[in-house]
Amino acid sequence: MPELSYLSSARYGKDAVRVLRVVREGSTHTVVEYNVRVLLEGDIEVSYTEADNSVIVATDSMKNITYYLAKVSPHILIPERFAVHLGTHIVSKYAHIHKAFVDIEQLRWSRIIVGQDGKPHPHSFFRDGDEKKTVKVQIDGTAGKDKIQAHVSAGINDLLVLKSTGSSFTSFIRDEYTLLKEVDDRIFSTSIDLNYTFTPVNISPPKDEKKLDIVIPASEQAEAGGVWDPKVLDRARTITLEVFAEDESASVQATLYKMGQKIIAENAGVQTVSYALPNKHYIPVDMSYMGVDNLTPAKAEVFQPVAAPSGLITATVSRK
Ligand SMILES: O=c1[nH]c(=O)c2[nH]c(=O)[nH]c2[nH]1
């Protein structure tokens, strides 16, 4: 019987590897908590097509490598670098593995502020909201293990914001399907997902297997707004929040575009900026049957949050 099918793609690995790392500097501790996903591609077809497990790096081993590097990597506190280190370590160690896809979600642990003078506590933290920092790294060793490239992107998920005015929505298409009234004043709330990408960078794996590190050229490390600048996320977050707060929003679309433009303008290495912004609707409650005006925009004070359906506005803004 002729073969009717073939394996057209294959990628496997470990998902949801949860790790908390404590870094001690005397009595001052720093903690990071990550959810890590590691997926691999390479010459692994026979594990699917021939039941040949000899090419499989067990996903359990991937978990163990993640924990081992969480212990020894000098990059553990910066998730972009840790992801690059983890992916590069695996791709350079296993000859038949050509690509690693490392995704990290960083949960928020902020220092508890104590005392009358408001001092950050040296070893106590609180979960500072649902927002996560996200990092996606693709380590590509297909051109050779001494020519490894890292494709790095990072951003934010689940940053929930709301403004009670400074947002309108008018002049959209009106036809037989249109129920929505034009409004020159409305609540604007969204849960921000942001992802920005950098141009790929070259990574040298360690020459000495035991010296567990990757070599990042010093010139690249120093580039402001570049892939190794740990301040890019802070700037992208601040820009996102400031534009959201200060823009006289004509629509979610128009505000999104301004956010993306500003991140590109202020971060030299950022090539593309993508947002996914659900429009979380808040509907003024109709009290007219009680003779109470809660519908005129200036009089609207009581709103019903509507979980679903929501709008979903997405776009990518790219450097020319
Ligand atoms: O900012 C908005 N963009 C839309 O595309 C849209 N559609 C809608 O019903 N309300 C809104 N608001």
Image: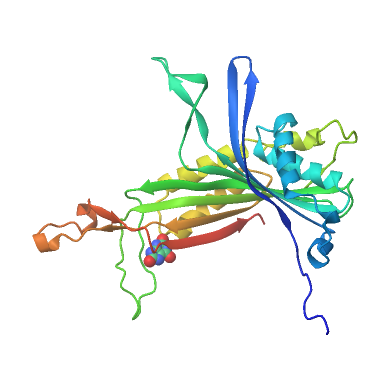
Q: Give the quadrant of the C terminus.
A: bottom right
Q: Residue at x 30, y 73 (%)?
A: 179
Can you see residue 226? Answer: no
Q: Quadrant of ligand 1?
A: bottom left
Q: Residue at x 49, y 21 (%)?
A: 120
In this view, the residue farthest toward the bottom is 1
Given residues 134 and 211, the one toward you in this image is 211
Percent of width and height locating residue 103: 66, 48
Q: Is residue 235 above or below residue 51?
A: above
Taking the image as shown, residue 82 lies to the left or right of residue 254, namely right
Callout count: 0
Given residues 50 and 202, the one toward you in this image is 50
Q: Is residue 121 above or below residue 90?
A: above
Q: Give the quadrant of the N terminus.
A: bottom right
Percent of width and height locating residue 192: 49, 50
Percent of width and height locating residue 157: 53, 48
Taking the image as shown, residue 151 lies to the left or right of residue 43, namely left
State the image quarter where residue 169 is shown.
Answer: bottom left
Can you see residue 48? Answer: yes
In this view, the residue farthest toward the left is 291
Percent of width and height locating residue 189: 39, 52
Q: Is residue 304 above or below residue 93?
A: below
